């Protein structure tokens, strides 16, 4: 029978302590967002342009600031 792999090769291990931050003596603050579908305790992954839930697959895209395409603003009035 094959030996069971141990150590950092396990993908199932999550560093949960990175999801929380302590402020002061007794205050604990979450650093990641909760999934709106799954509820509290399921955190969403932060990507460059979106937040994604690893459990249900819910994706929420971040809005980027764009220049307005309104041509009336770019006209110079005498």
Image (cartoon, helix red, strand yellow):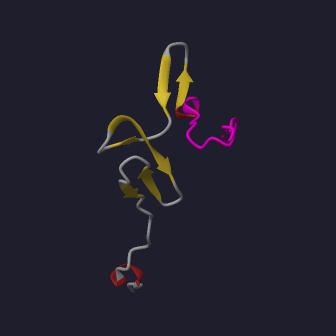
In the image, residue 61 sits, relative to residue 21, either above or below, namely: below
Viewer-side residue, 14 vs 50: 14
Q: Nearer the viewer, residue 64 or 73?
A: 64
Q: Position of residue 54 (x, y in %)?
A: 44, 49
Q: Can you name the residue that lies furthest to the front here?
A: 1
- Report the residue at 38% width, 84% height from top: 77
Q: Identify the image quadrant of the N terminus.
A: top right
Identify the magenta region.
1-17
Indicate left or right for 44 with 9 as reference: left
Q: Residue at 58% of width from left, 36% of height from top?
A: 13
Quadrant including the C terminus = bottom left
Splitting the image into 4 quarters, where does residue 70 fall? bottom left
Residue 74 rendering spot, x and y as whole percentages = 41, 82
Is 7 within the magenta?
Answer: yes
Residue at 52% over, 29% down: 20
Q: Is residue 70 above or below residue 32?
A: below
- 77 in the magenta segment: no
Task: Label the magenta part by its dominant secondary structure.
Answer: loop
In the image, taking residue 33 as reference, residue 70 lies left or right, namely left
Instruction: Residue 32: give x, y in percent of width and height.
Output: 48, 39
């Amino acid at each position: 029978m094959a030996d069971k792999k141990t150590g950092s090769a396990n993908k199932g291990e999550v560093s949960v302590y990175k999801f929380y931050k302590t402020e002061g003596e007794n205050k604990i603050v979450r650093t990641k967002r909760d999934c709106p579908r799954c509820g509290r305790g399921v955190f969403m992954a932060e990507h460059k342009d979106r937040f994604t839930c690893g459990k249900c697959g819910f994706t929420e895209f971040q809005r980027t600031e764009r220049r307005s395409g309104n041509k009336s603003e770019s006209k110079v009035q005498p």
